[in-house]
Amino acid sequence: MSGYEHTCMIRGDGGRTIRTILDRICDKWTLLVVATLDRKRLRFTDLQRQIPGVSQRMLTRTLRNLERDGLVSRTVYAEVPLRVEYALTGTGQSLIPPALALAEWAIKHIPDIEASRAAYEERADSAE
Amino acid sequence: MSGYEHTCMIRGDGGRTIRTILDRICDKWTLLVVATLDRKRLRFTDLQRQIPGVSQRMLTRTLRNLERDGLVSRTVYAEVPLRVEYALTGTGQSLIPPALALAEWAIKHIPDIEASRAAYEERADSAE
DNA sequence: CAGAATCCTGCTCGATACTG
DNA sequence: CAGTATCGAGCAGGATTCTG
C-alpha cells in the first residue's frame, strides 16, 4: 500500500461511512467474536469459553447483531441437548484482514502511546 | 496480503490489545479528526468547520485525548487573537493506512450489510 | 479565537434470575 | 445447552453558558 491517499474515503460523506462501520465493530466484543470464529465453527458455549470475560447476555447480543448484519451464520441442530453453531460468512471473513491491520498498528504503537500518556499524566499531576 | 493469518494478534491477550486500540479510535470523532488532519496543520476553528456536526466540547475532548496519546501535536502561537494549530505526529500519520483499510472494507461491504439487516428486520416484523 | 465548566439524557454493559 | 427478561450503574455525548 502506498499510503496517505484519499482520506476522503473516511471524511467523504461527513463521516457517515466510517461511522457506520465503527458502529458495527466498536463495541466491546464484536471484533473478538469475529477473530475467534476465524476459520472455525463454534457452539455458543465454546465461544464463551474462548472469550474470557464475556457474559451470556453480551455474547448473545453480539452474535445476534453479527447475524443480522450477515457477518455470522447461525445453524441450529434439532438434537437433545440443543446444538447451535456459529461461523463467519464470506463478508465476515473479509473483515479479518482490515482488523488485523488495526491490530498490527496497535501492537507496534501501543508502547509509544502508553509512554506519551504517562508523560502527559505526570505533567498534569505536577501542575497541580 | 495473504490474509487469514494469526488472528492471535487480536485474541492473544484476551483482547486487551485490540480493546486498547478500539478504546482510542472508536468514539464518534477521533478517526474523523485524524483523517481531517492528514497532511494538514489546522486551527481549532478550521477543524470544527471541516467536521460537520462536531461540537466545541467534543472537538476539544477528542483533540486532548489525541494529544495525550501522542497522535496529535498542539502548537500555541502567542498572538492576538490567539492561534492554536493542530497536526498529526508520526504516530498519528501511521494510523491513516489501517484506518483506510477499514474504510475500504466499509465501502465495499456496507451495501451487503444494509441488505442483510433489512431482510432480518422484515423477518422479525412478519414473525409478530 | 480557543477553550473550560456545568447540566442532562440515552444507551452500553454487567449481574442476576429464569426457561424451552 | 442456549438462550431470554429485568434491573441498575456508569459513561459517552450534546446543549448551553462563561472566560483569558
Image (tube, coloured by chain):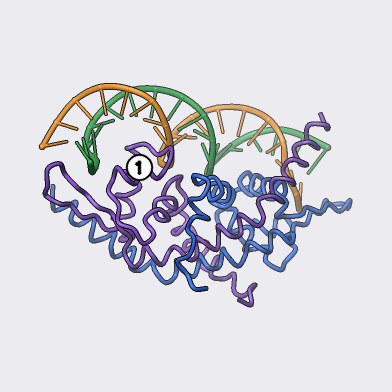
Chain colours: A blue, B purple, C green, D orange
**Residue at (34%, 46%) from the top-left corner?**
B47
Residue B14's x, y, as percent?
A: 53, 63
Q: Quadrant of the N terminus of chain B?
A: bottom right
Residue type at mark 1 is: Gln
Between A124 and A69, the one lying in front of the other is A69
Q: Quadrant of residue B3?
A: bottom right
Q: Is residue B89 left or right of residue B5?
A: left
Residue C5's x, y, as percent?
A: 22, 32
Residue B91's x, y, as percent?
A: 36, 66
Residue B13's x, y, as percent?
A: 50, 66
Q: Is residue B91 left or right of residue A83?
A: left
Between A29 and A9, the one lying in front of the other is A9
Q: Quadrant of the C terminus of chain B?
A: top right
Please state the total of marks drawn on the protein image: 1
Q: Is residue A3 left or right of residue A125?
A: right
Q: Residues within 10 Å of mark 1 (few under 14, many from 20)?
A: some
Between A86 and B55, the one lying in front of the other is B55
Q: Chain of mark 1?
A: B
Q: Quadrant of residue A35?
A: bottom right
Task: Say above or below: B1 vs B22.
Answer: below
Residue that numbered label 1 is attached to: B48
**Residue at (49%, 44%) from the top-left corner?**
A14
Q: Quadrant of residue B81?
A: top left
For numbered disc 1, what is the local secondary structure? Answer: helix
Single out the residue that lies furthest toward the bottom.
B2
Q: Is residue A1 left or right of residue A47?
A: left
